[in-house]
Image (cartoon, grey):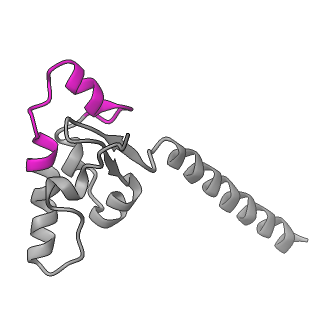
Amino acid sequence: MRQAAIASVVILAVLLGAAFIAAEDRGRAEFSVFGGSRGEVPFTHRQHQEKLNDCNICLDYFPQQKDAIKSMKEKGELEKKLVMNKLCTKCHKAEKAAGNKTGPITCSQCHIRKKG
């Protein structure tokens, strides 16, 4: 009987932990689309989180809130091409130089122009 009670407590703790993690993950964007005059730029947030393991790389520049980049652009608080030149391509080029798999490093590799 005691073993069944302990097992029940352990199972409950695991389920509560899983529910907490799932709730926390819902607050994170899986995929975002940024833009500019050259077209949209898809961004896989989770993929970058898993690869970098350091959210502060980006959060030093951007507040941790929904649509932070869009909001900063609208307020004129975002230096032109900051994201591309100081974050994305800088990191991607460093990864490529180190011989690692990396993301796009040129404008046309990132930006997707809408057809039509």
Instruction: In the displayed orientation, state which residue is furthest to the top.
Output: 75
Residue 78 image point, x, y percent: 14, 30
Residue 50 image point, x, y percent: 36, 64
Compared to residue 109, the image places residue 4 above or below, namely below
Q: Quadrant of residue 44?
A: bottom left
Instruction: In the displayed orientation, state which residue is furthest to the front.
Output: 116
Query: Is 44 in front, or is 114?
Result: 114
Q: Residue at x 70, y 58 (%)?
A: 15
Q: Quadrant of residue 63?
A: top left
Q: Is residue 16 left or right of residue 6?
A: left
Compared to residue 57, the image places residue 97 above or below, namely below
Instruction: In the displayed orientation, state which residue is furthest to the bottom.
Output: 99
Q: Residue at x 22, y 26 (%)?
A: 72
Q: Residue at x 25, y 49 (%)?
A: 111
Q: Quadrant of residue 76?
A: top left
Q: Is residue 64 left or right of residue 83?
A: right
Q: Residue at x 27, y 63 (%)?
A: 52
Query: Is 60 in front, or is 86?
Result: 86
Which image quarter is the C terminus in? Answer: top left
Residue 6 image point, x, y percent: 77, 67
Residue 84 image point, x, y percent: 14, 48
Q: Is residue 61 left or right of residue 20?
A: left
The question of residue 67 being in magenta is answered with yes
Q: Is residue 94 left or right of residue 104?
A: left
Task: Specify the segment rendered in magenta.
Answer: 63-85
Query: Is 103 in front, or is 3?
Result: 103
